[in-house]
Amino acid sequence: MSKPIKRLEIIKNAIELGDDDIIHSQLLRLKEEAHDEPLQHIVLMLEQKQYGNAMSAIITWLQSQRALTAWQDPRVAATRLELKALETELSELIDRRNARIQRLDEFNDLYLTRLGPLMTEILRLRKVLAEKLLRKQLYEGAEPAAEESARKADAASQDYESYRQRHQEAQRHQAAQERLAESERQELKRLWRQASKLCHPDLVEGDLKIQATSMMVELNQARQRGDLATIRLILGKLIQGQQSLMPGDRLNDPQRLQRRIQELRQQIGVLNAELIALEKEGSWQLVTTLRDPEGYFRQQEKAMSNTIRTLEKQITDAGFDEVA
């Protein structure tokens, strides 16, 4: 009942000021909140511009409500409003970051799909070459040089295995996306962003972070496997409020409100710094400035093919039989 009370106080002051615009703007909202007969009667009098009778009815109704309603520190309402504004700002920043990450992920998946086989072969050949050079040095008894070569061979092997796994993961993700129609792919991206705004761990505090983190993991896994049905289900629950995680409306303690405000200000600062850093990264600048993706990939394919030929020659020149 607190909203009708505050709204009628505004209307009462507006009548005293003779400001019909304020009366009209608040009346539209009051009509939606008038669930009892006295309020509905006040609405009717205001609509008929019976301001004298309306003022008397408003005063009577407000007095009756004050006798029933516990007093609430107006500073709490103001602080809660400030908190909600910060929650909205943080949510918008998260959405901006997610949109950029999504765009980078899509480009990386395309890169791995188009160039992954060539890059995998390059890394395999580097691994083979490093191992051959190591065996050659060990055979020749060059122990000091062999120690460095062993480190390089180990690093080359790790690079190859790591990239091979990333390429396989990208292939699985690409296959999942290809099972969806174009309209479904666009819906999946849109609903994922919408759901991630509602349950992102940065938006909540305390024990709710565990729940939010779990939901974000489920969302991201569903996105990776192209599971539109699961994303729809999670978003539906969030919209219906069954798993609403935004705490702003539930906090009444002034100290908790102030602590939460400070947390959000820090998180907003961190996110702004992340966005600035991301926009300076070479991968983001490439994605946002690339005008001819097909031409870019053809150029990369040519360069990688040349690298493969060079590595194959170096392996042959090393003089030892290849051991994969």
Image (spheres, rainbow, N blue to C red):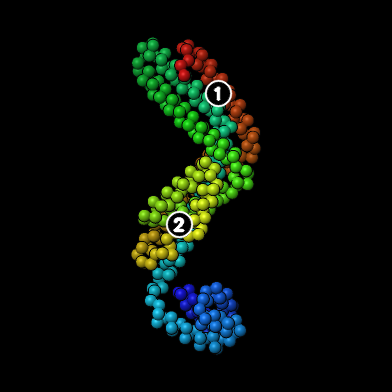
Which three-letter amino acid code belongs to the residue tagged 2?
Answer: Gln
Above-or-below relation of 28 to 61:
above
* Residue at disc 2, secondary structure: loop
Mark 1 Cα within 10 Å, few/some/many (few <14, many 20+)?
Answer: some
Above-or-below relation of 143 to 50:
above
| Residue appearing at x 39%, y 51% in the figure | 210
Tell me, for residue 307, which label it has, or none: 1
| Residue appearing at x 39%, y 60% in the figure | 260
Tell me, for residue 161, which label it has, or none: none
Q: Nearer the viewer, residue 13 or 272?
A: 13
| Residue appearing at x 55%, y 23% in the figure | 307
Residue, disc 2: 243
Above-or-below relation of 69 to 310:
below
Mark 2 Cα within 10 Å, few/some/many (few <14, many 20+)?
Answer: some
Q: Quadrant of residue 46?
A: bottom right
In the drawing, does residue 269 fall left or right of residue 108?
A: left
